[in-house]
Image (tube, grey):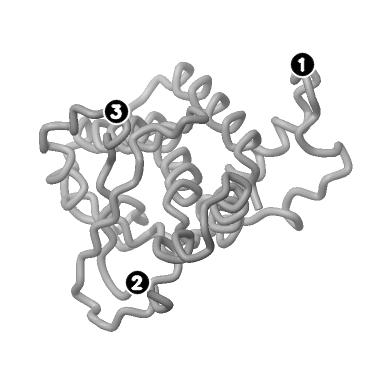
Amino acid sequence: AMSIELLLEIQKLCERKLFRCRTHASVLSVCLNAVFHIVSFVGGFRGEEMPMMSLDAIVKYLAYVPHPDPELAHVMIALRGRVKGERKAEACHLIPIVAETRSGLKPKLWVERAVKAYRRLGITHGWMFRDSKGAPGRQKDYEPELFDLIETVIANESLPERLLPKATVVHVEYGSGRSGRRGYATHATNEGISDKDIERLARWRRI
């Protein structure tokens, strides 16, 4: 599982990478990696569910007036296809997640940045995570960058407290498939969220 502290450091690294970008394509790449890891954590999604995010549906809901109450401000994550055991392949599932967590994760900001980067490239429809032909991407496509980000955090001697041991074998301990989902469940449990509420978001077949 990714810890909230690790993910906050990853978000900082993505901010720095974004500042150094010089092309729309490089901006999009940074934003998509941030969206993948932050949204999977906050939304309790498995890695294979993330490529099901629908760009055009998300664009549609971003156009709505934001909720005035910061506690209820959210971003609508739209997944198309068979999700969490539901049978309709054509279904579009709408899952609202908080715009910004109390700890400082900013899923809405990163989704908006990714949408803006796509718009600059003339793309407003299709899949949020896509391959060169426009088909849904693979979760494994976002794993190498995750490993690089975690290794950068491990190597950062300036952190007041070491988040991970230097001996951590990143590609063994972490992965794009389950680390976000497990991090969500662990953090929610630590925050006193009931198992039933954790499953309400992450295990639809049990509800």
Give the crowd class for mark 3: few <14, some 14-19, many >=20 residues within 10 Å: few
Q: Which mark is residue 70?
A: 3
Confirm or deny contact between disc 2 and disc 1 (CB under 8 A).
Answer: no
**Residue at screen point 24% across, 78% down:** 89
Q: Position of residue 196 (x, y in %)?
A: 47, 65
Examine the rendered structure and indicate whether residue 133 appears above or below residue 39.
below
* Amino acid at pointer 3: Pro
- The amino acid on which the numbered mark 1 sits, given as a three-letter code, is Ser
Residue at 52% in and 58% down: 194
Residue position marked by numbered label 1 in the rendering: 158
Query: Rounded to the nearest whole Å, what is the CA distance between mark 2 and mark 1?
Result: 41 Å
The quarter in which the C terminus is drawn is bottom left
Q: Tell which tag, 3 or 2, sits nearer the viewer.
A: 3
- Residue identifier under label 2: 83
Q: Is residue 18 left or right of residue 145?
A: left
Identify whether 35 is placed above or below 21: below
